[in-house]
Image (spheres, rainbow, N blue to C red):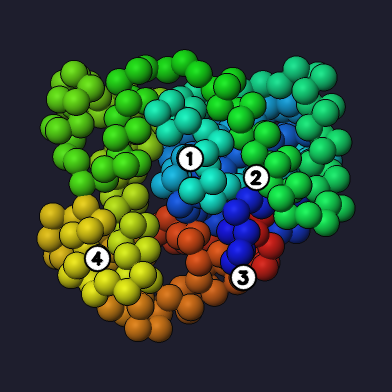
Amino acid sequence: MRPGRRAQVWRHQPAFRRPRHFHAEPEINLVLRGWARLGVGASERTLRPGELVFFHPGQDHVLLDGAPDLELFVLALDPALAERVVDPGRPPSAWSASLSPAELESLSEALRGVSDVASAEAAESVIAAVFELAAARMVGGGAAARRALEELLVAPHASLTELAARVRKHPSDLSRDFHRQYRVPLVELRARIRLMRFIEQVDAGDDLLRASFEAGFGSYSQCHRVFRRSLGCSPSAYFGGKRAQLDHVVCPGAPSSDLPVRRPSPTACTSRSPSP
């Protein structure tokens, strides 16, 4: 998200491609024309015109392939605004949703015209409307996994055992159901949410030790392990100057809230575009 913005929309350009990444803002990908093959965790899904997917904070995603005539819009909301638009007590639980032809036509016109809207509030209204529609359509899935996600987003310090007890599910059953529903292992999503909270706390002025506890880590050493595994460097190195370098290597000009999913052979971004 660009500084000062609470909502943003990007129109995909074929020459610009982001590496696999995750971030704190909820995101929607909507195909208006052509097709797009998206990856979330180890899963893939091909979207056709009128189909959309909703990415929760911490869900890694990437555009793997697309049609030559692909018209794809990416929409994101600031987390605080998202809580007002999408009921935090009922986060979208389905993998994807489909729009009716009439809805697709209406949204296509609105999204294509967002760049011509001078008022930031008017643009936010258009983007928020898409999120409201998506949330209403993306129902289904297991209630236990959905409730576990609700808990994680507000209390990332909770252990798997504690989460399972709250949703009245055996830990192994909850872990399996969560992975199947959200395409990311529960413990991995929890670690990413903690990691993003940790960075926010440090940016707000906390020292590394305090920030690690505030973010939900049981100790600084645990935070250090997760940080290094995810980003490939220590927290002190990241905040000591590695941050700008890492952001530049992963994707020049990408919002600082976007974090790469570290792979043995990471794909470098080739453009300054914030598109997927």
Within-10-Å neighbours for mark 4: few <14, some 14–19, many 20+: many
Q: Residue 211: give its label.
A: 4
Is label 4 or label 2 in front?
4
Closer to the camera, 27 or 234?
27
Q: Position of residue 225 (x, y in %)?
A: 21, 62
Query: Which numbered mark, 2 or 3, is in the foreground of this view?
Result: 2
Q: Is residue 151 left or right of residue 242?
A: left
- The quarter holding residue 178 reads top left
Measure the C-alpha gap from mark 3 to mark 4.
26 Å
First in sequence: mark 1 vs mark 3: 1
Judge from the rendering whether residue 179 lies leftward or rightward of residue 244; answer left or right: left
| Tag 4 and tag 2, C-beta contact below 8 Å | no
Label 1, label 4: how far apart the Cα atoms are: 23 Å
Q: Image point 63% across, 50% down: which residue?
A: 7
Q: CA distance from mark 4 to mark 2?
A: 30 Å
Find disc 2 in the rendering and name its residue: 75
Q: CA distance from mark 2 to mark 3?
A: 17 Å
Q: Which residue is mark 3?
A: 253
* Quarter that holds the N terminus: bottom right
Can residue 33 be seen from the camera position used here?
A: no
**Callout 3–callout 4 Cβ contact below 8 Å:** no
Which amino acid lies under the numbered mark 1 shown in the image of this protein? Answer: Glu
- Please name the residue that numbered disc 1 is placed on: 83
| Residue type at the position of mark 3 | Gly
Q: Residues within 10 Å of mark 2 (few under 14, many from 20)?
A: many
Q: CA distance from mark 1 to mark 3?
A: 27 Å
Q: Is residue 63 above or below residue 88?
A: below
Cα separation, mark 2 vs mark 1, equals 15 Å
